[in-house]
Image (spheres, coloured by chain):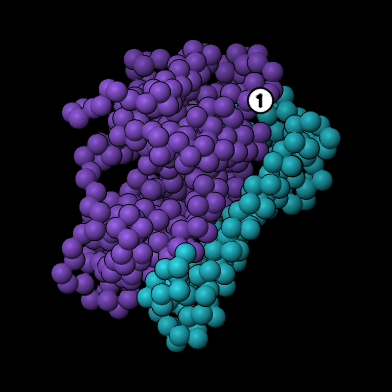
Chain colours: A cyan, B purple
């Protein structure tokens, strides 16, 4: 790792913070997924949609599946976190939110460098990812 | 197929054999009529007499092997996962694409930290491209879900055509380790794309810059749409664009591509999550299986013959792509 002391090669400090958050978050997300999945399939926490019902209907398209199983859309899963199947979304949502958090970490570094182009790119990316996460794009049903 | 070395180490044969065997096994276990008609509805429900844990368990093992193969072949998990699982498992393509994106996202997030710390993933190259690709992947995801609702056959045919195209791309593309870029373009210069990294294999610092930034930005619109529409991840496309079009060194291209996936797939993944296209019962064994397989694959990399595995993956992709087209056109030639 001696090459990292070379100023030409050393990444900017925010990049290291980005990497650290990404690393911790990814492993935490995967751990949460494994634990919640075990709680779900062992039946320790009851499910909103019974396992057999999922298996009987996973060949349907998503519209039909939602109709038959009364599955939630958008952020509706948050209200069902007490149920084993939707508790699983905690780990997946953590993974899908990580990048937004990491981008916010980059912003101060670009401000300090007065790098307004990349500051603007980061802000725009946070907006794009937040819009995607918000459920504005087509989660309201058809 | 020139240049094959048939004195392969046992691990290469074992890995190759396992993928082919598993694909065949899943193919035989799944009722072909049911798999072919996954989009057609109720007839399938009647056939699935397996206990609830059967398909998740098969998926876990299948994805574990897929994870090993993906690393050895130098492709992302998503590009193998979507065509193979949609072709041979009883899940609707909507859920396969949702799980495929989560698989690609988890893999990219896990690889990202190491690549960023070693300064191999270039933030300055990734961020502008990621903005374009992630915005496009939202459009791709929405378009894919709309097409799936309208007529899933169209989506199957498009997926099959894309997979066949990827197989041809993998077969034809010749990477360039360190392209020699004489003059950087104005946009690339304005973005400050370039840098220096330490190449351990050459034991020296390598400085690099890029060109053709506007062309790359336009290409990333298309890549984003395809990634979102089919839930494929897009490493197969990112690397050639960074390496061959922009002229970034291969190591920087591969690392930046992996990092870029963590951003592009995030936006598309949210669309699929919000639409209800992620079923934890099948998505989580896929993610865990592929990640465990990737860890094993990295360890096997030093003793395996990646070239052989790569050709084998190209053949499997061709088959999976043609099967998707066959399924979409209802020809029934491939089961």
The vertical placement of B51 against A32, above or below, is above
Please give left or right for residue B194 compared with residue A35 in the image.
Answer: left
Q: At which x and y percent is residue B251?
A: 34, 55
Q: At which x and y percent is residue B299?
A: 48, 39
Residue linked to disc 1: A55
Q: At which x and y percent is residue B313?
A: 35, 31
The residue drawn where x is 78% and y is 37% is A39
User: Subunit of mark 1?
Assistant: A
The residue drawn where x is 39% and y is 58% is B256
- Residue situated in front as seen by the camera: B22 or B56: B22
Please give left or right for residue B251 compared with residue A122 in the image.
Answer: left
Look at the image and tell me whether residue B289 can be seen.
yes
The vertical placement of A120 against B230, above or below, is below
In which quadrant is the C terminus of chain A drawn?
top right
Please give left or right for residue B234 compared with residue A75 in the image.
Answer: left
Q: Secondary structure at mark 1?
A: helix
- Residue situated in front as seen by the camera: B163 or B258: B258
The residue drawn where x is 26% and y is 40% is B169
| Occupied quadrant, residue B136 | bottom left
The vertical placement of A21 against B282, above or below, is below
């Amino acid at each position: 790792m001696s090459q990292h002391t070379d100023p030409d090669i050393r990444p900017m400090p925010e990049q290291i913070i980005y990497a650290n958050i990404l690393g911790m978050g990814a492993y935490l997300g995967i751990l949460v997924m494994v634990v919640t999945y075990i709680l779900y399939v062992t039946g320790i926490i009851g499910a909103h949609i019974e396992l057999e019902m999922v298996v009987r209907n996973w060949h349907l398209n998503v519209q039909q599946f939602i109709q038959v199983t009364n599955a939630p859309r958008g952020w509706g899963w948050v209200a069902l976190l007490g149920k084993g199947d939707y508790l699983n979304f905690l780990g997946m949502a953590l993974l899908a939110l990580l990048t937004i958090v990491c981008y916010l970490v980059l912003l101060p570094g670009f401000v300090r460098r007065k790098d307004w182009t990349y500051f603007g790119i980061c802000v725009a990316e946070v907006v794009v990812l937040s819009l995607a996460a918000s459920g504005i794009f087509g989660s309201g049903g058809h | 197929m020139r240049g094959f070395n048939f004195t392969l180490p046992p691990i290469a044969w074992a890995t190759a054999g396992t993928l082919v065997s598993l694909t065949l096994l899943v193919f035989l276990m799944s009722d072909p009529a049911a798999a072919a008609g996954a989009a057609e509805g109720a007839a399938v429900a009647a056939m699935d007499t397996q206990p609830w844990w059967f398909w998740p368990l098969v998926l876990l093992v299948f994805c574990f092997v897929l994870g090993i193969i993906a690393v050895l072949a130098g492709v992302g998990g998503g590009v193998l996962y979507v065509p193979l699982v949609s072709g041979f498992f009883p899940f609707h393509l909507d859920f396969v694409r949702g799980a495929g994106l989560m698989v690609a996202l988890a893999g990219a997030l896990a690889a990202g930290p190491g690549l960023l710390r070693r300064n191999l993933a270039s933030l300055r190259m990734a961020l502008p491209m990621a903005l374009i690709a992630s915005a496009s992947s939202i459009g791709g995801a929405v378009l894919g879900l709309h097409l799936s609702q309208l007529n899933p056959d169209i989506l199957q045919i498009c997926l099959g055509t894309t997979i066949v195209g990827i197989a041809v791309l993998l077969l034809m593309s010749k990477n360039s380790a360190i392209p020699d870029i004489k003059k950087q373009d104005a946009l690339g210069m304005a973005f400050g794309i370039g840098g220096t990294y330490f190449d351990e294999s050459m034991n020296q610092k390598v400085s690099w810059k890029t060109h053709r930034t506007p062309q790359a930005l336009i290409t990333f619109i298309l890549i984003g749409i395809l990634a979102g529409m089919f839930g494929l991840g897009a490493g197969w496309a990112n690397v050639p664009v960074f390496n061959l079009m922009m002229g970034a060194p291969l190591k920087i291209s591969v690392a930046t591509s992996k990092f870029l996936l963590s951003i592009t797939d995030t936006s598309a993944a949210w669309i699929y999550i919000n639409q209800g296209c992620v079923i934890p019962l099948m998505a989580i064994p896929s993610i865990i299986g592929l990640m465990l397989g990737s860890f094993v694959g990295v360890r096997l990399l030093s003793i395996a013959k990646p070239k052989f595995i790569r050709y084998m993956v190209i053949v499997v992709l061709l088959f999976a792509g043609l099967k998707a087209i066959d399924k979409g056109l209802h020809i029934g030639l491939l089961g």
